[in-house]
Amino acid sequence: MTRLFATLALLVTCGPTFATEKELPVAGKSSGSTEQISQAEKGYKALTQTAFIPAFWTQNAIPNAWKQWGVTEKPANYTAAVLERYGLHTAPYPNDGLPMGLRKASRVLSTGVGIDCMLCHAGSIDGKSTVGLGNTSLDVQTLFEDLAKVDGLSGNLPFTFSNVRGTSEAGGFGVYLLGFRNPDLTMRTPRKELGLRDDLCEDVPAWWLMKKKKTIYHTGATDSRSVRTLMQFMMHPLTMPKDFEKHEPAFRDIQQYLINLEPPKYPYPVDEPKAAKGKVLFNQNCAACHGTYGEKWTYPNKVIPLDEIGTDPTRHKGIDVAYGKEYSASWFGKEKNGWFVGGLPLRATAGYQAPPLDGIWATAPYFHNGSVPTLDGVLSSKARPKRYTRSFKTDEAAYDKVKVGWKVTELRDPPSEKLSPHEARKIYDTSKPGRSSAGHIYGDDLTAEQRAQVIEYLKTL
Ligand code: HEC
Ligand code: HEC
């Protein structure tokens, strides 16, 4: 049983799910009706108070984690050291003393610690914990390896959870876990091969963009109305088909919470006249794909083909049709609620969805693979660093207000073989599979002054 936990005890899947093009929802208003809001409040409660899956680790795992750090005694400020090593953040809601993303949950005959959505979907910006912001500090690989070892297990994960700190192989989790399920979600062994790979290098999209999106995930593969897609995370080996049914209403509330979330506001001064010039340039050069902003916003929900956008194709190609078919035929693809009957199957798309840019100042690094650390790099392909590291801190000192995004240190040489895997994951090398920072050259023809104006405008979204 313990080995089953060690190997299967996985997480999420935020893989593709799709809809037919017809009948996508109408883009919403910024704030919902009273009924939606109270449902959203229920959703927030469910999200921050429910253990949807059993625990992975014992309660001793966190207090003893330091024994895996190569130090001789427990660090003095232990809580801060735990946050720093794994890239976790203090919970702004009651969480049994655990950081966001970890959660008290049941184990067979006892209580332990597991994870929840906030592990990846709650981050920190300007030093503030923020639910809905992707966690770009997280080292999910080290977290799972260390805690399994403290509990006396091998720490060998069934596949790579992350190659680079701040990104994960969440799509791989989905492919792996669905392989153990029959279409009705009863367990099957051996695992069905659905095209598992671990070089997708996924950056986590901000949840507050959900209100505008008709399709979600980086490829626009899933209808944003799907509730069951949010539940792929529940494919823990001890979760039974009836558990999925039971929690579906809670996930309907959670979806309302996501749709009603607002982005944080840029906390530093903005040069308004400069931003006004940037707005004009933005509307000329960018709005056709990214939409317009303000009270009467528009969002075209476009997917740009791979050969046109030119960003790294791995994530797009990396989730196989075999997975899409299996997903669409399973309980996940068969939604019966609301105004649609007969399911929300996955949809194959030609490339990557141009996301809305609300709160874009807070969501560095950029592109679906987190390959570009600043907006300046997004707008100037030649200015993108090839190999770099950063502090993974989220305070004002770590933030670059000129280039807008995270401050990085460029590295000339490849990482030394002697670095521990934990240290090596702090280096983003754009020559590695799935990590190219090429493409999206739409800002290259702007002058440096115009680029700075567009960046100033982007701060206001
Ligand atoms: C291990 C990290 C991880 C966990 C845990 C996780 N997610 Fe995700 N999530 C991701 C990543 C990465 C993506 C982007 C996937 C892609 O398209 O490649 C994503 C995408 C999404 C999206 C689509 C957003 C968009 O705009 O395209 C939603 C909605 C979402 N997750 C909800 C959830 C919910 C709800 C939970 C908990 C039940 C959860 N996720 C748990 C990593 C995670
Ligand atoms: C032809 C459509 C198109 C045009 C024009 C375009 N973009 Fe994009 N943009 C995209 C797509 C598609 C992506 C996602 C690429 C990926 O993640 O691989 C993207 C990504 C981005 C991102 C990163 C988003 C994130 O969350 O990581 C920013 C910022 C951005 N674009 C800004 C701009 C600005 C500013 C302009 C105008 C100078 C512009 N774009 C012009 C299609 C476009």
Image (cartoon, grey):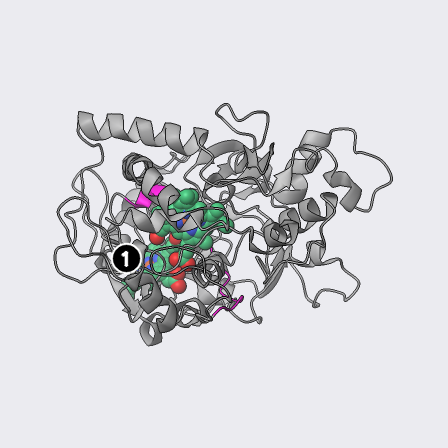
The residue closer to the viewer here, 365 or 155, is 155
Q: Which residue is rendered at x = 52% and y = 55% of the image?
A: 168
Residue 206 on the magenta span? yes
Q: Quadrant of the C terminus?
A: top left
Q: Which residue is rendered at x = 40% and y = 36% of the image?
A: 266
Residue picked out by circle 1: 333
Place of residue 251 in the rendered image (x, y in percent of width and height, measured from the top left) = 32, 39
Mark 1 residue crowding within 10 angstroms, few (<14) / some (14–19) / many (20+):
many
The residue closer to the viewer here, 332 or 363, is 332
Place of residue 187 in the rendered image (x, y in percent of width and height, measured from the top left) = 45, 57
Can residue 124 be seen?
yes
Q: Residue furthest right?
A: 72
Instruction: Give the side of residue 427 with respect to residue 178, left or right.
Output: right
| Region rendered in magenta | 196-210
Q: Quadrant of residue 215?
A: bottom left
Place of residue 456 in the rendered image (x, y in percent of width and height, measured from the top left) = 37, 45
Place of residue 214 in the rendered image (x, y in percent of width and height, measured from the top left) = 22, 52
Q: Which amino acid, by three-letter code, is at mark 1?
A: Gly
Residue 32 on the magenta span? no
- Tell whether circle 1 marks a residue whose Cβ is less than 8 angstroms from ligand 1: no
Relative to 402, does residue 388 appear above or below in the rendering? below
Relative to 243, does residue 183 appear above or below in the rendering? below
Q: Which residue is rendered at x = 31% and y = 54% of the image?
A: 332
Main SS, magenta region, reads: loop
Relative to 296, does residue 193 appear above or below in the rendering? below
Can residue 461 be seen?
no
Kind of element beneath mark 1: helix
Instruction: Give the side of residue 456 with respect to residue 68, left or right.
Output: left
Q: How many marks?
A: 1
Instruction: Give the side of residue 293 with respect to residue 426, left or right.
Output: left
The residue closer to the viewer here, 450 or 188, is 188
Q: Quadrant of residue 270?
A: top left
